[in-house]
Image (cartoon, rainbow, N blue to C red):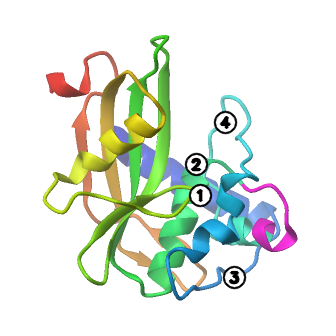
Amino acid sequence: MILFFIRLWYRFTMVWTRWRKPTAAVQPISRADEIPLRIREGNDYRADPKFFDYLAHPRCFQARVNAGENTFDCEDHATYWAVVMHKSGLCKKVALGMVYWLDQAGKRQGHVVCVYEDLYGRKFWADYRTPTPIEPYAPWWHFGIDVLSEFQGKRLLKVAYIEITDVHADDTPIFRGEHLTKGHWFGKSFWES
């Protein structure tokens, strides 16, 4: 149920940002490792305003990249990755992967990455750097363990996956495919589900 509202909110805020901000058509690539260079490996990351987490339209993201300005936060980077990969024809399947955990101090943290299957059937997750391979026979949520490890999280709470099935001509992603979850949004540990 929560994923339904997340998808709805993402759609609304993408329309809002596309209408309110400068845009440029998303530029295709020939190899996945070109994206980290384009986004300067996340060094131009810009957090959303406190208490107003929104998803910028990929064309707004591209306009900021073209202008050399600070880009947006993790879900915007992940969505941009997904749209570029899909538009470039470099993946069979692509999704946003959401990971939530407790840090060493017990504070709830989260991160969104692009999860994709390339044309050879290999699976990867990516945020700001070169894509990280996912073990070939690992369950779909395994990228969450990698993200937890990278951020030195203490306890995994939730992993979610929202597939992007297509991209409109205006570079708007369509969140209509699989949406899977493992774990709990609040309270219990990931492993107690």
SS of the residue under disc 4: loop
Tag 2: amino acid: Cys
Q: Quarter of the image for the C terminus: give it.
A: top left
User: Badge 3 local density, few (<14 within 10 Å), some, or many (20+)?
Assistant: some
Q: Position of residue 87 (x, y in %)?
A: 50, 84
Q: Is residue 192 above or below residue 98?
A: above
Q: Nearer the viewer, residue 193 or 41?
A: 41
Q: Which residues are magenta?
A: 64-71
Residue placed under numbered mark 2 in the picture: 74
Task: State the image quarter where residue 102 is shown.
Answer: top left
Task: State the image quarter where residue 16 is shown.
Answer: bottom right
Q: Are marks 2 and 1 in contact (CB under 8 Å)?
A: yes
Q: CA distance from mark 3 to mark 1?
A: 16 Å
Residue placed under numbered mark 4 in the picture: 52
SS of the residue under disc 1: helix
Q: Position of residue 119 (x, y in %)?
A: 30, 84
Upstream in the sequence, badge 3 or badge 2? 3
Marker disc for residue 25: 3
Question: Which residue is at a point 25% across and 43% down the rendered structure image?
Answer: 181
Upstream in the sequence, badge 3 or badge 4? 3
Q: Are marks 3 and 2 in contact (CB under 8 Å)?
A: no
Q: Nearer the viewer, residue 185 or 42?
A: 42
Q: Is residue 142 left or right of residue 128?
A: left
Q: Quarter of the image for the N terminus: give it.
A: top left
Residue placed under numbered mark 1 in the picture: 77
Q: Is residue 184 left or right of residue 105?
A: left
